[in-house]
Image (cartoon, rainbow, N blue to C red):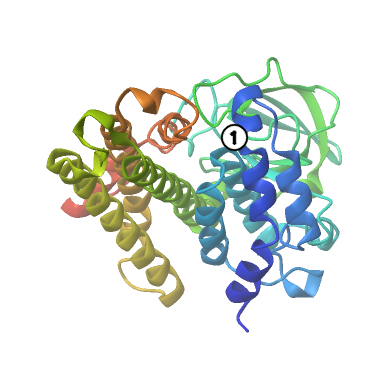
């Protein structure tokens, strides 16, 4: 049995837990701890950690398939998983055996800390600093958003290089380091349980050995490891949310009727069916594009980077449209929690504005189409 098949089989024990807590997570903005516990119990925290360190030895494409399925039940849980496996991909490539073993054992929850107040969604260009201090490094930064900010074990963190040329250097920064603080808890429109919040570092000391990759080579890590993993998993969140909204809209339309029209269901209205059909076509197009991107990565195709750049924007913008249509066809009832379209509509708003935003990606895609360099 392939790693992906094994992981999907294990995920079946996790999904009921994810679904059971979803409404509470959304209502109270509680971190989806039960999801993490269930993933740990199922041995899935180390899905993409090398087998040599006790992990399953899977790939980011395997993780993306799981994220999509989780997103159908709980957007917050899916985003936390997305960030964990994105961080774990970097640690698998550059981290120590000890940290990889902690991930494989389910004792380490990872996340990314790239976005900064000074460079906003231009994640590749941190303005935060790393200063050598003997065998240590001193970090100073104002990170604008980090998912799982208060709950992660450690951040995969970017800074300006210490001494080398280049855009950035990547570090592993433990969440409990003195000088790290999370100024305020998350209280957002959607993805309310993902604990996404600013993180501030003031004179935070970490060992130099916590460097992930080489000084000044952070851009290569971002482009070669982080971007493909994050893009396909973030897109998976949007696709899962679209699927969930469509399923719940269809259930409402077929189970709700007009009493004054002899009990005719809402689904009898041609206009409603036409709108739903449009949403379904859009969702299927985004899914096909996403699946082709996974195939491009797995097959090492020549168009892989273009597909990676496209996939998040395509899925995020589609989710905005699909969930809005689902709200529309369900009418006033969609504003209640009972129909369960409204949480997916709110969760879907995040994808297009998470760095790299859709607009930034459109610029990259346009440059690639014109044969221009993406940066510079």
- Tell me: residue 29, above or below residue 16: above
Q: Nearer the viewer, residue 51 or 340?
A: 340
- Tell me: residue 7, above or below residue 134: below
In this rendering, position of residue 59 left or right of residue 337: right
Furthest residue in direction top, as rendered: 183
Q: Is residue 214 visible?
A: no
Q: Position of residue 228 (x, y in %)?
A: 47, 56
In this rendering, position of residue 325 left or right of residue 42: left
Q: Is residue 126 visible?
A: yes
Q: Position of residue 178 (x, y in %)?
A: 86, 25
Q: Quadrant of the C terminus?
A: top left
Q: Residues within 10 Å of mark 1 (few under 14, many from 20)?
A: many
Quarter of the view holding residue 295:
bottom left
Q: Nearer the viewer, residue 89 or 55?
A: 55
Q: Nearer the viewer, residue 106 or 1?
A: 1
The residue sitting at 59% across, 18% down in the picture is: 187
Q: Report the label total.
A: 1
In this rendering, position of residue 171 left or right of residue 101: left
Quarter of the view holding residue 24:
top right
Residue bearing mark 1: 160
In this rendering, position of residue 255 left or right of residue 263: right
The residue sitting at 42% across, 38% down in the picture is: 356
Q: Quadrant of the N terminus?
A: bottom right
Q: Position of residue 360 (x, y in %)?
A: 33, 36
Q: SS class of the residue under badge 1?
A: loop
Q: Position of residue 131 (x, y in %)?
A: 72, 31
């Amino acid at each position: 049995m392939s790693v992906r098949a094994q992981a999907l089989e294990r995920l079946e024990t996790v999904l009921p837990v994810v679904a059971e807590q979803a409404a509470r997570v959304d209502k109270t903005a509680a971190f989806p701890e039960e999801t993490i516990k269930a993933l740990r119990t199922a041995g899935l925290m180390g899905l993409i950690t090398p087998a040599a360190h006790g992990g399953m030895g899977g790939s980011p494409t395997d993780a993306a398939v799981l994220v999509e399925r989780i997103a159908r039940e709980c957007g917050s849980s899916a985003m936390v998983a997305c960030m964990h496996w994105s961080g774990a991909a970097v640690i698998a490539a550059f981290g120590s055996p000890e940290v990889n073993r902690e991930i494989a054992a389910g004792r380490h929850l990872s996340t990314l800390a790239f976005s900064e107040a000074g460079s906003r969604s231009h994640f590749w260009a941190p303005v935060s600093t790393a200063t050598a201090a003997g065998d240590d490094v001193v970090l100073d930064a104002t990170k604008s958003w980090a998912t799982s900010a208060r709950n992660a074990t450690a951040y995969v963190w970017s800074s300006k290089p210490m001494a080398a040329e280049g855009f950035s250097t990547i570090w592993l920064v433990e969440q409990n380091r003195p000088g790290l603080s999370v100024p305020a808890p998350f209280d957002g429109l959607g993805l309310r349980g993902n604990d996404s919040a600013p993180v501030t570092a003031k004179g935070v000391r970490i060992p130099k050995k916590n460097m992930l990759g080489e000084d000044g080579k952070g851009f290569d890590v971002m482009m070669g490891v982080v971007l493909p993993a994050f893009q396909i998993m973030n897109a998976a969140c949007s696709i899962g949310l679209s699927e969930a909204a469509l399923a719940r809209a269809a259930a409402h339309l077929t189970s709700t009727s007009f009493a004054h029209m002899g009990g005719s269901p809402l689904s009898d209205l041609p206009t409603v069916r036409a709108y739903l059909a449009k949403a379904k076509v859009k969702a299927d197009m985004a899914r096909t594009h996403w699946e082709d991107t996974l195939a491009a990565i797995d097959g090492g195709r020549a168009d892989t980077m273009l597909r990676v750049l496209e996939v998040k924007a395509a899925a995020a913008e589609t989710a905005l449209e699909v969930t809005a249509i689902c709200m529309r066809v369900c009418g006033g009832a969609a504003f209640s929690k009972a129909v369960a379209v409204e949480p997916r509509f709110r969760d879907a708003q995040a994808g297009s504005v998470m760095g790299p935003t859709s607009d930034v990606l459109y610029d990259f895609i346009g440059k690639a189409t014109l044969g221009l360099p993406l940066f510079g």
